[in-house]
Amino acid sequence: MSPSIEPLRIAVLCPHFAPDTAPTGEVITRIVAELAALGHELHVVTALPWYREHRIEQGWQGRAVRREATPWGSITRVNPFPGDDKRNLVRRAAGFAGFSALAGLSSLRGGRVDAVIAMSPPLTMGLTGWGTHLVRRGPLVFNIQDVFPDAAVETGAITNRRIIGLARWLERVSYHRAAAITVLSDDLRDNVAAKMRPTRRDRVHVIPNFVDTEFIQPADRMTGLRTELGIGTEPVVLYAGNVGFSQSLEMVVDAARDVPQATFLINGDGAARASLEQRAAGLPNVRFSGYQPRLRVPEVLATGDVHLVPLKQGLGRVSVPSKTYSILAAGRPVLAAIDPDTEVPRMLAASGGGLAVPPDDPAAFVTALRQLLAEPAAAAAMGAAGREWVLGAASPRAVAIAYEQLVRSLGSPRRRSAFGSASR
């Protein structure tokens, strides 16, 4: 940063932060680190670590609020009110509301800031960020990783019209109280802008997530994880991520019957895992493994010869699987089953890093998978092309600078107040 440019003071409200293992937590942790490296002061309010087991992790229990000073500011962690059953939507909603309220109260101390960055989901963080803005005066930047409730409605996870109506109302209220909204793709920008007044649609900005290309690099396919799971030298078709109902993982399990020469590895946990394990009973080439520690992410990615990004029909415009960037960084080809003309197919077309087929089309999915497995040299070339593309398109520093520039463009009541005081 130029010495003549005054550093920013930013409050960050997010549901996960290191050492929590959620993908969105890894994203915001690195953005904070990059902003700190640019010389800015940041004060994070987040949840106590809980994502891996959906309960507060060992060593973090006993206190509802924990605060710590850091070289770049502070971290305040509050109880996330977790629930073990992700399918209990009422329980999850209550937990999100409780966390958002406690995070909001904890975010009010500390004086004026230049901006408040609040991350969703949960959608309730929009109002939490707005409340923080009212007290600490910095304009609200609402960061949307997934558009809720669209995805839940598309998958049938929410069918109650009153709940859907309430969520839609909360969505509109949150959007219109933000000075700026950041989304991950043009599709999400169109989705969000369509729900806003025409005069406010220019508040929606596209800032993609990033991938740490130094941490994730191409590596030998014969990993320790293969050994632990009893997998040999055969090709591995890998899905790594949340094992939920938004992903077409039933199609993946069924494909294993048609492609017996490969081992299918589903690495992760979630609400759909138990039913998938039942569906895969009797299939010797389907394996399941739980979430791995963050330090093993490059190893997990290296284990797969072909990586899958399957998303059910209708979700390609409301969710951008950020794992795609990590797969490309690992130098592995991607097979995406997702709505055409959405962000991931466009990314694969631009990079040459894989193939995309329509969602929930088993025949097209198996045909493309067989093609990638039958032509390992061509698949490896796709992986190398994807790696080269992501090196130039999604670096952590570039994303942090985009947020810095957005915050400066909004102006700062804190700076205006200081200037006014100095001029009197």
Image: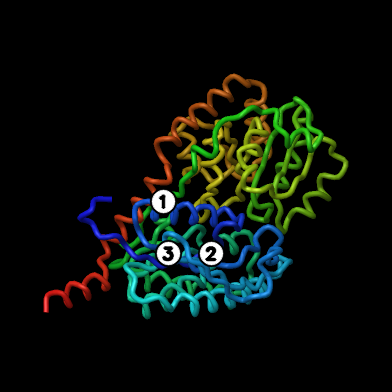
- Per the image, label 2 sits on a secondary structure element best described as loop
Q: Is residue 38 above or below residue 73?
A: above
Q: Residue furthest right?
A: 282
* Amino acid type assigned to the residue bearing label 2 in the image: Pro
Residue sitting at x 64%, y 27%: 220
What label does residue 73 carry, if any? 3
Dots 3 and 1: beta carbons under 8 Å?
no
Count the numbered circles shown. Answer: 3
Q: Point out residue 87 in the picture as x, y percentages from the top left corner.
A: 71, 65
* Amino acid type assigned to the residue bearing label 1 in the image: Glu
Q: Is residue 226 left or right of residue 381?
A: right
Report the Cα–Cα distance between label 3 and label 1. 13 Å
Q: Confirm whether residue 197 shows in the render.
A: no
Report the Cα–Cα distance between label 3 and label 2. 24 Å
Q: Is residue 411 left or right of residue 115?
A: left
- The disc, 2 or 1, on the residue closer to the chain's N-terminal end is 1
Q: Nearer the viewer, residue 393 or 255?
A: 393
Q: Quadrant of residue 174?
A: bottom left
Residue under pointer 1: 34
Q: Nearer the viewer, residue 275 or 111?
A: 111
Nearest to viewer (mark 3 / mark 2): 3
- The disc, 3 or 2, on the residue closer to the chain's N-terminal end is 3
Q: Is residue 156 above or below residue 305?
A: below
Dots 2 and 1: beta carbons under 8 Å?
no
